[in-house]
Structures are given as structure tokens and as C-alpha cells.
Amino acid sequence: YNVSPIYPPDAQSSRVQGVVIIEARIERDGSVSETRILRSIPMLDDAAVDAVRQWKFTPTLLNGVAVPVIMTTTVNFVLQ
């Protein structure tokens, strides 16, 4: 399940765009429990983190048992 970020109005009016890179901890149930920004665009960081925290993943299995994992993801903001 992937929620698209909401482009902050201030960033849109300032014509700010780019990629925010986030490290996320995916729990056994596929939910995102922790995030850490690895590459920041200050005007876009909060929107990126808000979206990623709502994402839901298929649990990762190790020997048939669900385990938490750390992954890196990018959130791309492009003006249209």
C-alpha cells in the first residue's frame, strides 16, 4: 500500500522539487514504525515522512517467520 505525498503549498509556490531519501523500519506486520531522513530537502521532508509512515508492506519472511527489516526509499517531488 503506497500513499503519495501531499506537495506542500509553500514548496510548490517556491518551485522546490527533488528527492527525499528515507530509511524506514518495516515491522513484522508490514507497517512502518521508524523513519530517518538520509537526504533532506527541508521544505519537503515532513510531507515525505508523513507519506512513508502510511505505507504498508508485505511482511519479510526469514525461514518462514516474519522479521522486521530496514529499507531505504526515495520520495520524488516533481512540479507539473
Image (tube, rainbow, N blue to C red):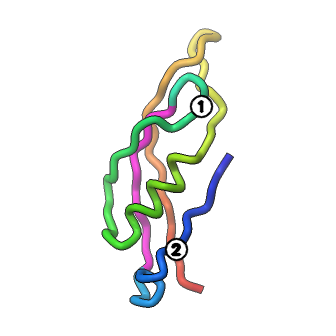
Number of marks present in the image shown:
2
> Residue 79: where, in percent of width, then height?
54, 83
Q: Mark 1 is on which residue type?
A: Gly
Up-down: is 73 above or below 79?
Answer: above
> Residue 53: where, in percent of width, then height?
51, 46
Say whether residue 30 is left or right of residue 70: right
Up-down: is 3 above or below 15?
Answer: above
Which element is circle 1 on? loop
> Residue 32: where, in percent of width, then height?
51, 38
Please tell me which residue is depicted at 60% across the width and 19% down the height of the picture.
61
Up-down: is 40 above or below 15?
Answer: above
- For the stretch drawn in magenta, the main secondary structure is strand
Q: Which residue is mark 1?
A: 30
> Residue 78: where, in percent of width, then height?
53, 78
Q: Which residues are magenta?
A: 17-26
Residue 7, labelled with which disc?
2
